[in-house]
Amino acid sequence: MAVERTLSIIKPDATRRNLTGKINQRFEDAGLRIVAQKRLHLTTAQAQAFYAVHKERPFYNDLVSFMTSGPVVAQVLEGENAVEKNREVMGATDPAKADKGTIRADFAENIEANSAHGSDSSENAAQEIRFFFSDIEIVG
Ligand code: IDP
Ligand code: MG
């Protein structure tokens, strides 16, 4: 499996509880390298655009409100099989169903405020990385 990159977002519920360092430790312990990182407060338009794929889902408006409720930390993670590896480290969307020892099992507040976002395919990863970062900001 080749080295690849994925887009991660530490969500507002986690930044509010000062969990950025603890979550980053999980990535690094799993062999993922943080090759770009920035803290930002998304506008409504930005959150709507980022989650456009979910715009028909019943939770879309709530999700946009949540993602704009405080700062997030957007990051690019690099490593072997990074997309899948990051999904494993995060755990299932619903923390009640997430495996023990995953970020969401240990830190998420609920299915919406679930502490972390991770791209779900390498195609989406490339697009999501481009949404937040220019090439010059990614240092492998
Ligand atoms: P993922 O983040 O595990 O890839 P998605 O299905 O892509 O999960 O959903 C995107 C985000 O939307 C989730 O991380 C979560 O914050 C929110 N979400 C997903 N399903 C629900 C739900 O049933 N109720 C409320 N929020 C949800
Ligand atoms: Mg998803």
Image (spheres, rainbow, N blue to C red):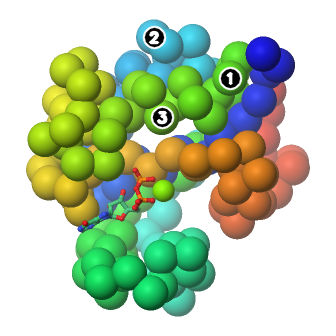
Mark 3 or 2 closer to N-term? 2
Q: Quadrant of ligand 1?
A: bottom left
Residues tagged 3 and 2 counted as in contact (Cβ below 8 A): no
- Element assignment for label 2: helix
Quarter of the figure with residue 3: top right
The amino acid type of the residue labelled 3 equals Arg
The CA distance from mark 3 to mark 1 is 10 Å
The circle drawn on residue 81 is: 1
The amino acid type of the residue labelled 1 equals Asn
Mark 3 sits near ligand 1, with its Cβ under 8 Å away: yes
- Element assignment for label 3: helix
Going 59% across and 20% down the picture, which residue do you hit? Answer: 32
104 relative position to 86: left or right: left
**Where does the N terminus fall, quadrant-wise?**
top right
Going 58% across and 47% down the picture, which residue do you hit? Answer: 120
Figure check: 18 above or below 16: above
Mark 3 or 1 closer to N-term? 1
Return the x and y of residue 15 as percentages of the image width and height. Answer: 29, 50
66 relative position to 87: left or right: left
- Element assignment for label 1: loop
Q: Which residue is mark 3?
A: 87
Q: Which residue is mark 2?
A: 29
**Across the whole image, how many numbered discs are drawn on residues?**
3
Figure check: 3 above or below 137: above
Pick the front one: 57 or 83: 57
Between circles 2 and 1, the one closer to the viewer is 1
Mark 3 neighbour class, 10 Å CA radius: few under 14, some 14 to 19, many 20 or more: many
Return the x and y of residue 45 as percentages of the image width and height. Answer: 52, 88
Quarter of the figure with residue 59: bottom left
Pick the front one: 63 or 67: 63
Going 57% across and 12% down the picture, which residue do you hit? Answer: 31
Figure check: 135 above or below 25: below
